[in-house]
Image (spheres, rainbow, N blue to C red):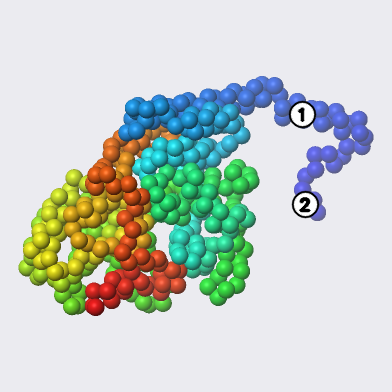
Amino acid sequence: MKLFYNPFYKLKSLHTFVKVAAILIVFLYHPAKLAAQDASQQDRVKGWSSDIDTLLYLVKTQHYVYKDKPLPPQMISGAADLKTKVAQYSDERMLLELEKLAYYMGDGHSYTLPVARKVRSFYMPVQFYLFSDGAYVIDAGDPYKDLIGCKVVSIYGVPVSKLVDDMNGYVHQDNKYTVQWFAPSILRFRGLYEPYGMPAGAADIALSLIAPDGKSIERRVTFIPATDFHGIPKLIPSALAAGAPAPLYLANIQDNFWFSKMPDKRIYFQFNQVEDKDTETLAAFGKRFGDTLQALKPASLIIDVRNNNGGNLDLLGPLIDGIKSFEKSNPKSEIIVITGRNTFSAAQVFISILNRDTHAKFAGEPSSSCPNFVGEGNYFLLPYSGAMGSISNKYHESIPGDTRKWIAPDYPVLLSSAEYFKNQDPVLDLVTKKMER
């Protein structure tokens, strides 16, 4: 039984072998074919080099800081070096390298995405999250759902802690919590692992994990096209809670804004997006909410913006006015704002104004931005690769002269994996206890 076809099966002499080999070499490596490959590679190098130049031009002409001052030397030298390495790098790694150039703009709104219009990206069908006790799988597609709840020790043999630490030096950010927010999604992308030695175009990748029962697991995860990547996802309720209801802060995250009454004359207000809803504008809600606060006069108001990554800050006025009016007419009422790494952009403006104009206290973990920051969604599309991103062209100064990198919580609380997978909320639990005293 013939299991395979050997083209050299009937060759009886070395002379015959050499002749056939010569014919094959000519056929496979004909100068015309090599010339076509060289031309294609030359076009690619020129295309990416042009995109690099275009990015520098856009930064120079559009960025809030660098349109009036020289570009950072590291950006210029990094761009020049990158041009010499295009032929060595895959398209996926080139997108990562463009993000490294964007890092030098020094703000959380200037970036290059790991996906593009004209080149393909691949990622793992697994979603990670960084808890106080490490990185864990919180969601996954088939056939990896059994990995949900596992701690991720290393990816491609590189400790997750090192991967995240390295990101602090090249992922766009306003502060270190921006990286904590972005890192779990960036960890999914194939291009990230080429600098650590993984071959370009690898079909899969090795993960070292610890299962919930404490056993070590080695698993290979196959990359899939990143066609459904739509930015950094909000945290989802635990898939392993064994019937425990989703905690309040994760129960209705798709609703832009809503509130409910709590025991002991408390009101819980969740603000998930600075955008109007189809059924109600934020302005109308702000007035309705303010009227409700004045009518009910709650002893305490909890404002939860852990899931709010921004939107249109021009819509904030009526909501802020309602909260400030409530505090002014009810000075003994307590206001506590719960923030997290997903609190960003227009949501940062919201909490900065509350920090400036009210006596609100803060709980949870710091937000991903500063009281004053360069930030605006000013989008670009590079012509050759279709790489997409943003170059910030505005400065938002909510608290003049404030140089803090974040608003430090009065009641700092970090979420552990055990608490998350049980659908517990240690932040709201602490806040509630503080208000009961």
Spatial separation of the CA atoms under disc 2 and disc 1: 25 Å
Q: Is residue 409 left or right of residue 317?
A: right
Give the answer, above or below, for where 90 lies relative to 330.
above
- On the image, the x and y values in percent for residue 322 come to 12, 58
Question: Disc 2 vs disc 1: Cβ atoms closer than 8 Å?
Answer: no
**Numbered tag placed on residue 3 in the rendering:** 2
- What is the quadrant of residue 331 in the picture? bottom left
Residue 329, given in percent of the width and then of the height, sits at 8, 63
Q: Is residue 271 visible?
A: yes
Which image quarter holds the N terminus? bottom right
Residue lying at 77% horizontally and 51% vertically, measured from the top left = 3
- Residue 206 position in % (x across, y down): 61, 57
Q: Earlier in the sequence, mark 2 or mark 1?
A: 2
Q: Is residue 147 among the parts visible in the rendering?
A: no
Give residue 372's quadrant in the image. Answer: top left
SS state under label 1: helix
Q: Quadrant of the C terminus?
A: bottom left
Going by the numbered disc 1, the residue's amino acid type is Ile
Residue 128 position within the rendered picture, expressed as x and y whole percent measured from the top left:
47, 59
- Please report the residue visible at 59 percent of the width from the left and 44 percent of the height from the top: 195
- Which circle, 2 or 1, is nearer the viewer? 1
Q: Is residue 97 above or below residue 302?
A: above
Residue at image position (58%, 28%) is 84
Judged from the image, the secondary structure of the residue bearing numbered disc 2 is loop
Of the numbered discs in the image, which one, if any, rests on residue 210?
Answer: none
Q: Nearer the viewer, residue 323 or 214?
A: 323
Instruction: Find disc 1 in the rendering and name its residue.
Output: 25
Crowding near the residue tagged with mark 1, few <14, some 14–19, many ≥20 C-alpha atoms within 10 Å: few
Q: Nearer the viewer, residue 23 or 278?
A: 278
Amino acid type shown at disc 2: Leu
